[in-house]
Amino acid sequence: MSVRLGFIGTGDLGADHVRRCANIMSGATVSALYNRTQSRAEKVARQFAPQARVTATPEELIESPQVDAVVISSASQTHEELVLKAIQAGKYVFCEKPLATTAEGCERILKTESAIGKRLVQVGFMRVYDQGYLNLKSLVDQKAIGPLLMAHAAHRNPTAGPHYTREMLISETLIHDVNTFHWLLGESFTAAQVLYPRSTSKADAALQDPQLVILETESGVLIDVEVFVNCQFGYDVQCAFIGESGEIRLPEPARATVRRNGQNHTPITMGCKERFETAYDRELQAFVDGVTAGKLTGPDSWAGYVASATADACIRAQKSGQREDIRLIPQPGLYQ
Amino acid sequence: MSVRLGFIGTGDLGADHVRRCANIMSGATVSALYNRTQSRAEKVARQFAPQARVTATPEELIESPQVDAVVISSASQTHEELVLKAIQAGKYVFCEKPLATTAEGCERILKTESAIGKRLVQVGFMRVYDQGYLNLKSLVDQKAIGPLLMAHAAHRNPTAGPHYTREMLISETLIHDVNTFHWLLGESFTAAQVLYPRSTSKADAALQDPQLVILETESGVLIDVEVFVNCQFGYDVQCAFIGESGEIRLPEPARATVRRNGQNHTPITMGCKERFETAYDRELQAFVDGVTAGKLTGPDSWAGYVASATADACIRAQKSGQREDIRLIPQPGLYQ
Amino acid sequence: MSVRLGFIGTGDLGADHVRRCANIMSGATVSALYNRTQSRAEKVARQFAPQARVTATPEELIESPQVDAVVISSASQTHEELVLKAIQAGKYVFCEKPLATTAEGCERILKTESAIGKRLVQVGFMRVYDQGYLNLKSLVDQKAIGPLLMAHAAHRNPTAGPHYTREMLISETLIHDVNTFHWLLGESFTAAQVLYPRSTSKADAALQDPQLVILETESGVLIDVEVFVNCQFGYDVQCAFIGESGEIRLPEPARATVRRNGQNHTPITMGCKERFETAYDRELQAFVDGVTAGKLTGPDSWAGYVASATADACIRAQKSGQREDIRLIPQPGLYQ
Amino acid sequence: MSVRLGFIGTGDLGADHVRRCANIMSGATVSALYNRTQSRAEKVARQFAPQARVTATPEELIESPQVDAVVISSASQTHEELVLKAIQAGKYVFCEKPLATTAEGCERILKTESAIGKRLVQVGFMRVYDQGYLNLKSLVDQKAIGPLLMAHAAHRNPTAGPHYTREMLISETLIHDVNTFHWLLGESFTAAQVLYPRSTSKADAALQDPQLVILETESGVLIDVEVFVNCQFGYDVQCAFIGESGEIRLPEPARATVRRNGQNHTPITMGCKERFETAYDRELQAFVDGVTAGKLTGPDSWAGYVASATADACIRAQKSGQREDIRLIPQPGLYQ
């Protein structure tokens, strides 16, 4: 039996999820689409799923008996309300990050999902499905380098649009690293600090790009993350752990080397979709497999909440210039 | 509409294809299975496709109206006859390499398929779906290093069983490299030579392992391939092209590096399935997509024939110690 | 004409300098040796320079007409006094780092050397002679990645003795990175901060190992340096710059790769001498060449002062847990 | 006591050896120079060794009591006669490769040196002083990958002049690889074969560039060496051994990586001097140290003979298109 998916938001990433479901994934069909600009949803339907219905409202999609599970890729500020509605309709829901724009919004989701008493939500943190990060996770879990002490990371984008704000550098970009470390280490964060290097002339000065974010975890692991959203040279994600007896490094994507003109050349990926293409495929497949099995396994609402609460502290640290404490609500039983 | 696949041969690789179809692929269902030992087919069906039918004969499977296309993973000597039957039944057929155990067998398939006038066959050369080889192919096609002059390659397995013969080193192992170079270069081979280094003490002396196979192509590209099926240290595939202005190298699979005890450690894959897992997924998906579209795009019977005819020459060269010419029949119009 | 060198301090590193002078370098001879324990100096003389004289006091060595230039490798707390005496005797002097144990001590040397009006001092910061760092320097000077914004570095030792204190982690270890960045960037530092990750169980808890030191430069470059003196796995030095258009990384020492047992293995150097052997050869050769030419070119007293003043601020930051300002005296004309 | 060196031939490489002796090496002085065009020798003397004498003939230099040892960098066809004269004068002699232009010439040197009963000759095979090759040698000697079975190598130059002949590709270029494998494996060669790939359009067609040379050793190790003297992209030397339990690879020279414009860039050396600069320093220092100690340790006349006799067979194989046997004279006792 195929899982019938309804897609809310068919912009860039949303349309890509529709394509994925139509052409690549196993056990799922595109049943319905909704987009704020309806013609866009119709266009995507024509291209990938002519048999799918385009609904007039997201509520119509969520409540449709032809929709077994919902995939939300609409604007960040709509996430909370739509996720709540899906939960209340008893539907499984995959929601792109962030789960909500504030930690408080995430708390409302935790509460509602806990009241239902069943995990219905998967958050779109795709890195946990990347082969390289899975490889890191496996080495961390094996204690390949003993207890962990530090991590060094970088999250670099070639360019960010002119609308990109200092807060978005945290809430849209760093949030991936926050979730990744939460998952890799299996623990939460206790404090955050943000340091400002000299800013690149290729970005608006108000953005302050790059930034160095320092996170501390419950067990004392110190993590530094360079976030640089106008680095020009590539979409480049780096991660290394330092433990008591060694170091582990995230591998770079495998690319053919060309020796030419006195140089070895190896390409760097230029975008998120290129870098994490397979991870996107796998995260949505995992959601569908979870729905089919009646048991979701991917990043849950608690992960979404931890990421948002930590991002909020980083934004406070951006403003204060100080080390900011991170305090979380107790983890509800559903997520333990 | 889902493509209903019938699987002939549910041994190691065959069962893996059933799993792939059941759990990973898009647009296909497992409809029927046949295996020489029927209980094995039944076991695989129970595990991955309880709704599928287990047939008493391969003919029954091929002719079943519930089977849209056939996947052959049975013993090499059965391939030719089964492929011919599938073609005669007008069914699309995916056949593991080799297409037939001799060039003559492949020729009979070319003739039958040409008579039907439609490409129905895809041969299981999965490397053409590997991301690294696709990367090489794209650089070759872009003429990134100018006209090609040479290639250096290696095909290494940790161990081969005691039954592994000198001929199998060509017909089961080297045949992958032959097809890969045929596809990468877009041309055929004109001569072959085999040189014998000192043999490893870890293999039967009669096997003569490793061997160095030298191939020449129509345009004069000289290819050397080290084939070493008892190399102990890993399943390791290497490939580099030398052109007029540079060199291109196949990337190694991306793996996390561990620094520990005075050494950097990066793992080497230990088996074919681990090394080419994604390629296997993609080749079968490409077959299903081709069936759905009514147009196959993967390695065709001509590729199967070229590989077999070239392998035959290599086996002659193993025996003669001389450079052996390779002469092909004219390429039928269907494959041009 | 050969430069006649007198060596004060013939411990581990001092004896190595004597060997270097006797066996490897051009244009220099070992003329005299002094060591606090005289028998040690005699032993080193017998081994490498039987014709050299062993003096009873360092002053006798410095003032000897048979000594053209002095090499100081004695204990850190003796450096200032011996350097001052050499300057006052009008002798060129190579002094191991630190130039003095405090910034004030360095200031006294700056004053005395300035009064003489001639550069007589070279400080033993050997990294500026390492091929890899020279490669970095050349790329920085070419503006290969545009204006620099950040640097990430690591300085790791396998183990530090039980006597190793929290301050030594700065004054003996980090001081090399401080000098290296001063030289690479051609600017000084304005502030320092020290962060404490979870401490390794393999070091005394009082040491707090590893540490993350953050330095800011005059132009706003933000540098983070992981210092980990009990990392177990190797003597490992890492350095990367982030500029407006790219990244540059210090290469690892070239070592043969061994593929064995399912792993690629590449060795990591285990000690400072192994890692910087050629750099040590070149720094002392550069000193001798400078003496011969009447013009020193290596790290000068000002570099020694900047390193010490910056290290002092880091030690303050270790204690305060705060960002500490770094204020330097005006650079005397002699060093501009 | 300094070894007084006389230099015969002060062209490109010869002048570089003079500079090396004057500026870099320990224990040697430039005593005399001879060059066919005397003004060239005078110019080199003025630049590096104003106190050295320029002689009118090479014999005058060889016989001068001011010359302890001779360094020959003149044209290849002069080597044999000059080496013989130096031996007869009882002088140590360092001779650039080839020791003589034919195996017979080398045999005359073996005979003369044997008659004197003392090793006086070092041949200029500098690779045995390269850190990377020493690293390989050490791993081979440790049997890090078990008994050796094969080697794959490449010797690439960016361009060769128009005068460069097919024979020179062996006698001037491949000869380095021949000597290197002789030294690494500690055994001689029994047969050679040369294969011709498609030739680059960037070289004269008569040259046939690149070529694949196959060598067999006494124990059956099969070595393939790609020689490509107009490869355009760099001076690139590759070497890998395959043993019963693994593979060892020569490291590439350490160079900083630049990430820029969507590519990782690592430079490739562009010339022999850049690639082997330190090896050249060390080979001449080893010669001087050997002279001082009265015992040479570098590549001896036997190594020179084996390289020339093997090169002769490769040239025969270039012409015959066949596998050519290599037969050596018995190794004289002096070299055992």
Image (cartoon, coloured by chain):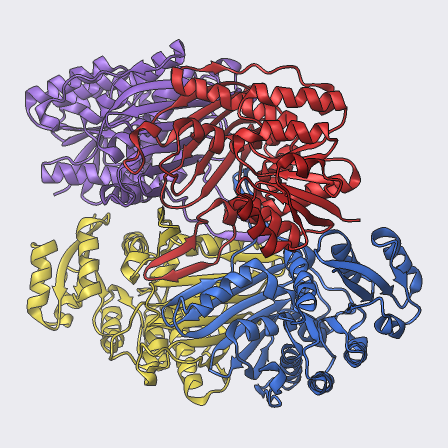
Chain colours: A red, B blue, C purple, D yellow
Q: In this view, does D332 lie above or below C145?
A: below
How far across and how far down the image is residue D43, in percent?
7, 62
Residue at x-position 26% and y-position 69%: D87
Side (left or right) of D214 relative to D33: right
How far across and how far down the image is residue C99, in percent?
24, 22
Of C36 and B208, the residue lying toward us:
B208
Residue at x-position 49% and y-position 19%: A313
In this view, which residue lies farthest toward the top? Answer: C320
Of B85 and D104, the residue lying toward us:
B85
Q: In this view, does B191 lie above or below C132?
A: below
How far across and how far down the image is residue D66, in percent?
14, 59
- Please indicate, yes or no, whether residue A213 appears anywhere in the rendered image: yes
Q: In this view, does B173 lie above or below A131?
A: below
- Please indicate, yes or no, whether residue A297 appears anywhere in the rendered image: no
Side (left or right) of D280 relative to B19: left
Residue at x-position 11% and y-position 29%: C336
Quarter where residue C167 is shown = top left
Side (left or right) of A87 relative to A151: right
Quarter where residue C296 is shown = top left
Side (left or right) of C106 relative to A271: left
Count how many numbered circles sit on residues in the image.
0
In this view, which residue lies farthest toward the front? Answer: A56
Of D119 and B173, the residue lying toward us:
B173
